[in-house]
Image (cartoon, helix red, strand yellow):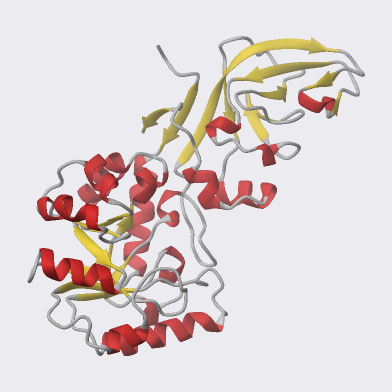
């Protein structure tokens, strides 16, 4: 069986994007966020390519994602951003991955389970999401903990002029002076573009590696392309309607192709009226609503038949602007039904 959907992934573009961030990280090491199965592209395939290019620091969300990655080489560092629940302890002890401790309970749990073994620690500098508070850091809660990376996360790095960026960097710098760690890390993809004061010892790009534009100054190469097989081509008369709700009314005779893709595959309903596909070099519009598994496109005047393949226009920044859906959702929401093909 072959899938009627293809997600084509440009490995060379992925590596080029990582090298772009590595060059702009200055003296800081450049890692890679590969959570959510490598932002939906396949975490192991991403790690293998970036590790071969020189990346040594990777970040996932959960211990299930550690297991899904499988064994990694000794030169690779893997951190688990969501830390250490009680039930995670046996897997953490059996793994070379490090938990990122976010709460006093996690710190106590790690001290009891693995005294002297390295971990990472997240401190909150204003995002109020994950991490020890500044007062908890100042309370000596981390005394005796061997910290490989002390990190925090920027809330507004996509807005370079937002004063919160400077407040977070200043607080992180102050907390770094209180906590001994091998390395300090603050910048995500957008944070790298904010400049040297945000880079510290290690940067952690994510979206920018995969072809998204996280903020001003980023210049990512496109990494993904979507294509779908034509299931049927039909003639539609003037006045006929297409799709649910009869939203689209043909104003002239048309040829319409129905493609094997829909919102169950992450091609969101928000593309209705704004989505396009490229067919034989021509950009053609979607017609009517996006169904769970199907979309319709205008192929009037083109030689298109059942079984042909059509490329959907899915540039992440442009698609986000057109639909109002974030680049992160457009990328990580791509479903499991695609045949993922690496170039």
Q: Is residue 110 above or below residue 145?
A: above
Residue 178 image-quadrant placement: bottom left
Residue at x 56%, y 31% (from the top left corner)? 264
Q: Quadrant of the N terminus?
A: top left
Residue at x 37%, y 80% (from the top left corner)? 133
Q: Is residue 163 visible?
A: yes
Measuring from the top left, give residue 205's x and y in whole percent.
38, 61
Measuring from the top left, give residue 147's x and y in whole percent.
17, 74
Residue 69 image-quadrant placement: top left
Q: Is residue 314 above or below residue 297?
A: below
Depth check: give the residue in front, 180 or 248.
180
Q: Name the outermost residue toward the left.
A: 116
Q: Is residue 28 visible?
A: no
Residue at x 63%, y 30% (from the top left corner)? 278
The reply, left or right, for residue 271 in relation to residue 63 is: right
Depth check: give the residue in front, 128 or 324.
128
Measuring from the top left, give residue 174's x and y in whole percent.
33, 90
Depth check: give the residue in front, 87 or 20.
87
Measuring from the top left, give residue 279's x and y in whole percent.
64, 25
Q: Quadrant of the C terminus?
A: top left
Residue at x 21%, y 75% (from the top left corner)? 183
Depth check: give the residue in front, 57 or 308.
57
Q: Is residue 114 above or below residue 286?
A: below
């Amino acid at each position: 069986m072959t899938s009627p959907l293809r997600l084509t992934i440009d490995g060379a573009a992925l590596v080029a994007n990582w090298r772009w961030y590595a060059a702009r990280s200055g003296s800081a090491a450049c890692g890679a966020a590969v959570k959510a199965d490598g932002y939906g592209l396949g975490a192991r395939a991403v790690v293998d390519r970036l590790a071969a290019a020189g990346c040594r620091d990777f970040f996932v969300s959960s211990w299930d994602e550690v297991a899904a990655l499988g064994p990694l080489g000794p030169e690779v560092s893997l951190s688990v951003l969501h830390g250490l629940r009680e039930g995670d302890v046996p897997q953490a002890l059996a793994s070379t991955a490090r938990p990122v401790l976010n709460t006093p309970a996690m710190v106590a749990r790690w001290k009891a389970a693995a005294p002297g073994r390295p971990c990472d620690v997240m401190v909150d500098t204003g995002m109020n999401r994950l991490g020890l508070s500044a007062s908890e850091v100042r309370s000596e809660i981390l005394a005796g903990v061997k910290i490989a990376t002390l990190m925090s996360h920027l809330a507004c790095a996509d807005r370079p002029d937002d004063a919160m960026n400077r407040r977070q960097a200043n607080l992180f710098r102050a907390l770094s002076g209180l906590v001994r760690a091998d390395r300090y890390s603050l910048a995500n993809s957008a944070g790298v573009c904010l400049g040297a004061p945000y880079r510290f010892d290690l940067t952690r790009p994510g979206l920018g590696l995969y072809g998204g534009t996280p903020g001003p100054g980023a210049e990512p190469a496109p990494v993904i392309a979507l294509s779908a097989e034509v299931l049927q081509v039909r003639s539609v008369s003037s006045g006929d309607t297409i799709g649910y709700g009869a939203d689209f009314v043909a104003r002239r005779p048309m040829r319409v192709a129905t493609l094997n893709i829909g919102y169950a595959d992450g091609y969101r309903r928000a593309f209705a009226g704004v989505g396009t596909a490229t067919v034989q070099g021509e950009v053609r519009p979607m017609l009517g609503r996006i169904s769970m598994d199907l979309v319709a496109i205008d192929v009037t005047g083109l030689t298109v038949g059942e079984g042909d393949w059509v490329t959907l226009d899915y540039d992440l920044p442009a698609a986000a602007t057109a639909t109002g859906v974030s680049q992160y959702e457009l990328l990580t929401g791509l479903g499991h039904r695609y045949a993922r093909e690496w170039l």
